[in-house]
Image (cartoon, coloured by chain):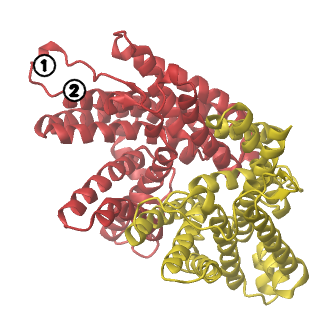
Amino acid sequence: MQRFVVLTLNGLTEGSIYAAMALALVMIWRATQVVNFAQGAMAMFTTYLALFALERGASYWLAFAIALACGLLLGAVVERVLVRPVESAPPLNVVILTLGILLVLEALAPMLFGGQIRSFPAAFSIVGLRLGSLQIPLSPFDLFILASVLIMMGLLLLLFQRTDLGLRMRASAFNPEVSRLLGIRVSRMLTLGWALAALVGALAGLLIAPSLLLYPTYMDQVLVFGFTGAILGGLDSPPGAVIGGLAMGFSLSYVGGYLGSDLETVGALVILIAVLMVRPRGLFTLRAQREV
Amino acid sequence: MAIRLTRWPSLRTPTLARHLVLALGAGVLLFLISSQIGAYDDYNLAEVAIFAIAAAGLNLLTGVNGQLSLGHGALMAIGAYTTSLLLRGRDLPLPLLLLASVASASLIGCLFGVAAARLRGPYLAGATLALAVGLPQIATRYSQVFGGEEGLTVAPPAVPAWLGADFPPERWLAWIAIVAALVTFVLLANLVHSSVGRSFRGVRDHEAAAALAGIDVARTQIQAFVVSAACAGLAGSLFAYWAGVTNPAGFSLALSLQLVTAIVIGGLGTLSGAVWGSIVLVFVPSLTSGMASSLNLPTSVANNLPLAIYGAVLVVAMLVAPYGIDGGLHRLVALGRARWAGASSNHKGVVDWDDPAGG
């Protein structure tokens, strides 16, 4: 029973990070119909920038803010400079382009910051909280992870559901042509969508860095699990991405805990295939699309 | 175009004879090249041939049939492990091992193809990505059978005695890989030009229309997956010989992604595209790592420069040559031809990708 609680809480914190990654991927997919394989590498790069700032004497929170701001900027630049020109090319080309960006960033990071594995500080203690005499496997930093992912999701929800800008972004994603006719600057909305997604990714990178340690490819597995979560939930559904990401966190934690950690990704594969066999477009895609 | 067709009837039909003649010509040429170059270049040549087999199979699936697979490295791993496991403590003839690897990869490919036939676009990409990440872990988990992280060693194929004692084994491997690649290419070229190939393309271009025309869409997609997996299995088996060891690290996600980049860089949907892509895949990193080590850079830069350049090549290629090397070449040829014929107004080098020769 105690093991189950440990694994559940562990799955919850890891799942919330996968959920953030999945959400970032879904935001970009909805805006531009691109699966951004460079999402993890971009987050890796911004986390290195945070570490760079920390080593120059910046406080944790300043470094945190710098990483998020750089994420925003990096997302906008990548969309505007690299992705925009290949929009009309065959869809696979954008996939290759994002893979190219991934490789460049993963090669650039060790050139600029050194290739050795680095530790990244956590904002709060990573020792489990105490309830009376009982130590529970949930640290203040875990709570911080959950809270920041929740706050970020709440803000995004507010943006997309309650503001004019969010409405315009949703309209551009839903039907670019009509939105353009209605006077929306669709291309700006797409750039903004990429920027926001990169911000969400940067947050995920900062939050998982203390437990995974920092090295150029540390976000690869987060990207794979986040993508799997997004596929699980359905690429068209932001709530689906969050639920899919959490589901990935729980299932990886249970498979790793009960069957052995070297079966984690095999377990993820089996779950993914099983779900996709029943729901080929993910769990939460509402309209069954018909292609004629 | 009709004029050319009547002028060269013997070269355009029948298909099989034309492909055999082409393959024979290429074989002789490669045989001559391979005999002239050093052992290290033969080793690279073998690598190109191996990647070309896998990339050609993937190009059939992705370029011709429209199903994206990010998991072909895992299918190569199945071929490689089949060969390595069968070779353990035994000495079996090479063709038998190649066939066994093709068979096992086809079987897994069929199973996965059944699942993949229900999936489209990014969902298929996600499922195959999970295959690429998940499958190598099985080798780590059951290390008594698969040798764990260290993997299984594979002895290079023995050079036959009649070639002489000092014949480099790299050259012998290159010959085997080239013959395997040419056989694969002839078979694939015939398949693409047959009714099966036409239904592959029909399903890619318009599923509903293909179904209305009486094509069983799911079955066609599974067929494409099996053929493609068979190629990956063959390539994997040769890869085991080439690398000398079969371990999970050799079949990482990077390998699967490299194959996809190869076909897009080379040109989607054509066999020559697979060859171009494999050449880029093998020679760009080896050229750049040679360059980086000669530039006297700090190690952290020199070690990562080849990767950075490869990534930059991908990005730039997608920006300037969206249809790959093959597409770019055809465009150049078409432009040249249009200029030569004086018909510059209507022919802007637009090429029909399914039939770039314009037949």
The reply to the same-chain question for discs 1 and 2 is yes
* Image disc number at residue B129: none
Reading the image, the residue beneath label 1 is B163
Which chain does the residue under circle 2 lie in?
B
Q: Is residue B72 above or below residue B230?
A: below
Q: Residue at x 76, y 68 (%)?
A: A144
Is residue B9 something that shows in the picture?
Answer: yes
- Chain B, colour shown: red
Q: Is residue B159 above or below residue B351?
A: above
- The answer to whether marks 1 and 2 mark residues whose Cβ atoms lie closer than 8 Å is yes
Q: Residue at x 52, y 80 (%)?
A: A53
How far apart marks 1 and 2 lie (CA) works out to: 9 Å
Q: Residue at x 77, y 49 (%)?
A: A11
Number of marks drawn: 2
Q: Secondary structure at mark 2?
A: helix
- The foreground one among B146 and B256 is B146
Instruction: Tell me which amino acid carries mark 2.
Output: Trp
Q: Earlier in the sequence, mark 1 or mark 2?
A: 1
Reading the image, the residue beneath label 2 is B172
Return the x and y of residue A243 as percentages of the image width and height: 83, 55
**In-image side of B247 versus B304 (left or right):** right
